[in-house]
Image (cartoon, rainbow, N blue to C red):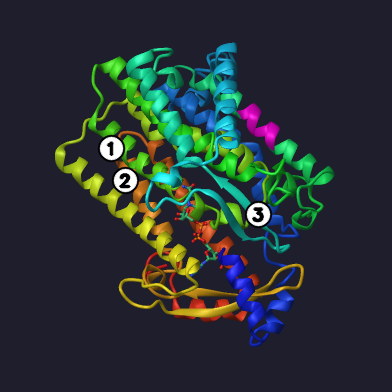
Amino acid sequence: MAAHQEKKTSEERNHKGTQKDTQTSQVQWGRAWEVDWFSLASILFLLMFAPLIVYYFIMACDQYQCSLTEPLIDLLTGNKHLADIWNSTPTLTYRAAAIYTLWVAFQVVLYVFIPDFCHKFLPGYVGGVQEGAVTPAGVVNKYEINGLQAWLITHVLWFANAYYFHWFSPTIIFDNWIPLLWCANILGYAVSTFAMIKGYFFPTNAKDCKFTGNFFYDYMMGIEFNPRVGKWFDFKLFFNGRPGIVAWTLINLSYAAKQQELYGQVTNSMILVNVLQGIYVLDFFWNEAWYLKTIDICHDHFGWYLGWGDCVWLPYLYTLQGLYLVYHPVQLCTANATGILILGLIGYYIFRTTNHQKDLFRRTDGNCKIWGKKPEYIECSYMSGDGTKYYSKLMTSGFWGWARHFNYTGDLMGSLAYCLTCGFEHILPYFYIVYMTILLTHRCIRDEHRCFSKYGKDWKYYTSAVPYRLIPGVF
Ligand code: NDP
């Protein structure tokens, strides 16, 4: 919608101002065409070590009560050999394979075969067929937004099973956690490899493919922009949102059930993790149409980074706090629990309000009110690969006037709150805040590089008007 408005505006106006800048940048925006040595080294590092990092964390919980140092000490002192640790690791089981296959198949059915009905009765919810942003080749894809519905159906069934049907134990996810890890890896590698082959031989939109000539970079960062099977099965929307993010809240519920089984009670820290992360997940699905305009969908190509990352990294490492609390049930005093809840809610408020302000601004083409006033903005223009000139606006009002990525700041505050629920005995639960800080700082830099390539000197005007990235006055 916004893309059409921008295009229409462009047709109605004279090409003026930054024509020269945007012409030089037209072939550059979107993912890189060339690979520098630093990117290549980072990619090789991640391809080799990311699966090991996930294994190490989950194994440390399973065999060492979530201590990250003890396995290393055991290995360095010769107390244990790698083979001992590996031999104590649960293997792939038929049961886990069956659970995982059923899970993914169920999410595919919900995604492909049940058109959204939530938007028909939930006021304010945007679901059903929605348009994504304009791609570098000038394509505007349509998406069936039915994630909230998939999440609701899945969770209603989960609770119906837990309290009424008793088909399986609610601890099923925790009880099969490592065997399920092997299944998630198989799917993650399979889908990334398939996406790569598809990019070469039968891409959905050849003009939006990018080949750097470097096998590892292309495998990691993806070739195709929006790979699809058929008209509607969009890889990015499916793998980003489901099965990983729908599973996130179920995984936490399974951890809570395990605490109940082991200790006869669920601690307030576990409830806080379930509530705060539940709000974040529900927010994601409530705003799934908005998600079409985020970097994952608008700018990233689909490779191992998204394919394996969504299948393995996200469900296993984003849920470490709940897993930790199964091994170390922390009961927080009321003051600490309240403080953490307030930090998490303020973080969420900043995250949501900032994202909402941009969405509203872009949807209405600036004809809206931000904090009761007409928004201020910088006009900018860019060109797609087919030579069409588009106009856009960068808002400098509201939270977007405080910092260029204040939504990330809110996200980081929320992330810190999840970690704090676990107390200070171990560092494992703090992995999430460390990772999110690296991810979102890198994302700032990556996004700003792309925006500069896209908007040229207009982007410079914007960064002079809003000089800070994450924390006003500091960074
Ligand atoms: P943004 O939603 O901030 O989108 C960045 C894009 O917005 C830019 O590329 C530009 O796109 C546009 N833009 C930038 N500045 C302005 C402005 N002043 N006015 C209008 N438009 C602007 O980033 P993300 O997609 O990375 O993040 C979305 C949310 O998702 C964030 O809140 C983030 O915290 C969260 N997130 C969470 C992750 C997790 O793992 N939990 C991972 C990644 C993100 P254009 O080309 O259209 O101008």
Q: Position of residue 423 (x, y in %)?
A: 28, 37
Label whose residue precedes the other's in the sequence (1 or 2): 1
Q: Are the residues flagged by discs 1 and 2 in contact, CB closer than 8 Å?
A: yes
Task: Give amino acid for label 2.
Answer: Ala
Quadrant (top left, top right, bottom left, bottom right) of the C terminus: bottom left
Q: What range of the chain is rendered magenta?
A: 185-191
Q: Residue at x 48, y 30 (%)?
A: 57
Q: Amino acid at mark 1?
A: Leu
Residue 29: x percent and y percent? Answer: 68, 66
Q: Nearer the viewer, residue 297 or 470?
A: 297
Can residue 209 be found in the magenta stretch?
Answer: no
Residue 23 in view here: yes
Q: Is residue 227 left or right of residue 133?
A: right
Residue picked out by circle 2? 417
Task: Residue at 28%, 33% (x, y): give it.
Answer: 271
Residue at the disc numbered 3 = 141
Residue at mark 1: 272
Label 2 CB less than 8 angstroms from ligand 1 = no
Q: Toward the viewer: 57 or 365? A: 365
Pointers 3 and 2 in contact (C-beta within 8 Å): no
